[in-house]
Image: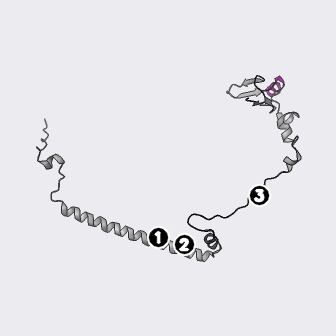
Amino acid sequence: MRTYDDTFSGQKIYPGKGKLFVRGDSKVFRFQNGKTESLFLQRKNPRRIAWTVLCRRQRRKGITEEQAKSRRRRQVKSQRAIVGASLDVIKERRTMRPEVRSAARTQAIKEAKEKKAAAQSAKKADKAKSAAKAAAGQTTGRVVGKQAAKGSMPKPKPTSR
């Protein structure tokens, strides 16, 4: 069973009860009875009318003491191991002095750059090798198609009028 909330008072509206008011901008308002509809159309503020849910909530009425006093427990942060590193490795890195960490970082960056440069030079050498091989294998300057290689008739030259 679907129930709706009264737009003004905040109380439940059961099926077959209440009114539906659609404003010019197509906004829908639901009212439990004529009283709430009338107060809404008079542009009364529901927070100032004592019996509305909004007013009672604002003044903290009707909530039991247990609910009012119950607070959320603080979240306790805990460290967990990551795929690449165990928990003791993470703790060790955290306790490491900043100078040592920065030195290790610069060393790692340097190694990565060297590795990249080596890969780049290997790639260049490979490219030069393949270019030399291609130059040696090419006898004629023009590209020959499949049919031409088999000895077909050449394309006729275009004639201009």
Which label sits on residue 112?
1
- Relative side of 131 to 115, left or right: left
The amino acid sitting under disc 1 is: Ala
Q: Which residues are magenta?
A: 32-43
Task: Kindly report the distance in space between the C-alpha atoms of the residues bearing marks 1 and 3.
Answer: 43 Å
Q: Which residue is mark 3?
A: 74
Mark 2 vs mark 3: give the one in front: 3
Task: Kindly report the distance in space between the C-alpha atoms of the residues bearing marks 2 and 3.
Answer: 36 Å
- Relative side of 64 to 124, left or right: right
Mark 1: secondary structure: helix
> Quick one: label 1 or label 3, which is nearer the N terminus?
3
The amino acid sitting under disc 3 is: Arg
> Quick one: label 1 or label 2, which is nearer the N terminus?
2
| CA neighbours of label 1 inside 10 A, class few (<14), some (14 to 19), many (20+) | few
Residue 62, horizontal then vertical, whole percent: 88, 40
Of the pair 37 and 44, the residue shown nearer to us: 37
Residue 123, horizontal then vertical, whole percent: 34, 66
Of the pair 23 and 59, the residue shown nearer to us: 59
Q: Residue at x 15, y 59 (%)?
A: 139
Q: Residue at x 74, y 24 (%)?
A: 20
